[in-house]
Amino acid sequence: MLLSLRRRFGHELRARRWVLFLLLGLLMMCFGFVFTALSTIVLAPASIETVRSFHPAALALSGLSALLLSFFWLYRGFRTAFRLLDSKDFGLSTRLREFVFQKTQVSAKLFSMVALGGGTGLSSLLKGLKELPVDLTAIVTVTDDGGSSGRLRKELQILPPGDIRNCLVALSRSESLLSRLFQYRFGDGGEIEGHSFGNLFIAAMTGVIGDFGSAVREASNILAIKGHVIPVTNDNVQLIAQFDDGSEITGETAICEARKRITKMDLLPASPKANQEALSAIDDANMIVMGPGSLFTSIIPNLLVPGVAEHINSSDAKVVYICNVMTQPGETDGFSASDHVNAILEKTQLKRIDIVVVNSRRASRTLMERYETKGQFWVAPTVKKIEDLGIRVLAADMLLQSDLLRHNPNLLAAILIALVNENRGVEPVPQDEEEDDESIFDD
């Protein structure tokens, strides 16, 4: 409860404190002028007659003019300072504007949206969502054990920073040099080969502060992100998968490489403590979005953390699942959209999904064949089967097609903001047959 209040009102209280100090300073300045004038009158009584010789209206007009001129020059001073700062560091300038002029005060009234996931799916979604007028929180899975994140996790006993880093950069307010620096990956040679600078930075910050969650908050401030990025748990957890042949494997990377049908997912340790900030964000949310992303290694792991699914079940928020456009080898071979939905509801404690967003279009034949040779196939929308579960389905052409197949983040953002507006009674979400804007898609 306290964490929720701090997140909601912290910036507003700090901004008001700053304004209070400014007003007190101006008030003390006025007192100084008044007492100086009084002391002059006391020391030189003859000056009273001089003062009385002025017309009262003229004195009032002079005082008002001086006050208006002071406000004008204060405004000019702030505007000039921010203009100069814009050219040097736009992110810092934006944060100062919000801090000084209380723009964050509006955030208390913004539609609150929580996005759960991990991997490239979540970071891609966040790039589109960050421009929306919503209070955005990303809750990120921490079970990655491959690549740079896996090495740092093993060597330093910290949570894997990779997915967190990608989300931070996705929510960064501008494509600044600092954002590119966080994504820089060291090449051949030395112990840091293959590591990204952002991963090393978060690891170093964790060592300095002593807490991974605090390190993420500091990195958020440095990158001036819009929203919040929160690990779902601060415990060092691993994934355990049981397969249809009775075997069991521990570790996200090994599970993906096994290429067997998964029947059950667990965490090790079995009951990690959920991050209280994540639970508070879920409780305060107006909409909770899951996906896109790896079903068994990005979406479901968040829901396995005790308390997360239960808080979603008891929330008044609208729960939206964005289904993947292609299957993933070793995880969802042969899965349709309805199979994705059933897996979430059967393998976790989550009891409800209100809306499922599915892709309705296949990619070009050439690109499909390239994916199929790698064991990845189009996820059939199976709208009727999902609707039979009592779930509303939004089917749309969501492909962003280049050399890779992925969701169009801008279109996903448009669908979600339409749902936000619908929730406020503004207008309904357009259906697939109404999607005629060819400029949205790259065919």
Image (cartoon, rainbow, N blue to C red):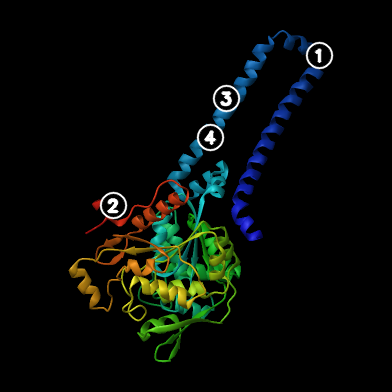
Q: Nearer the viewer, residue 356 or 295?
A: 356
- The residue at 34%/67% (across/down) is 384
The image quadrant that residue 63 belongs to is top right
**Mark earlier in primary sequence (2, 1):** 1
Q: Considering only vertical position in the picture, is 212 above or below 332? A: above
The number of callouts visible is 4
> Label 1 vs label 4: CA separation?
39 Å
* Disc 1 versus disc 4: nearer the observer: 4
Q: Which mark is residue 77?
A: 4
Q: Which mark is residue 45?
A: 1
Q: Amino acid at mark 4?
A: Gly
Label 3 or label 2, whichever comes before in sequence order: 3
Q: Which residue is mark 2?
A: 434
Callout in the foreground (4, 2): 2
**Amino acid identity at mark 2:** Glu
> What is the residue that sits farthest to the left in this orientation?
366
Q: Secondary structure at mark 4?
A: helix
Circle 3 crowding by C-alpha within 10 Å: few under 14, some 14–19, many from 20: few
Question: How far is disc 4 from disc 3 in space, using C-alphas?
Answer: 12 Å
Distance from disc 4 to disc 2, alpha carbons, whole Å, reads: 50 Å
Q: Amino acid at mark 1?
A: Pro
User: Mark 3 against mark 1, which lies toward the viewer?
Assistant: 3
Q: In the rendered image, which quarter is residue 121 located in?
A: bottom left
Residue 413 lies, in percent from the top left, at: 39, 55
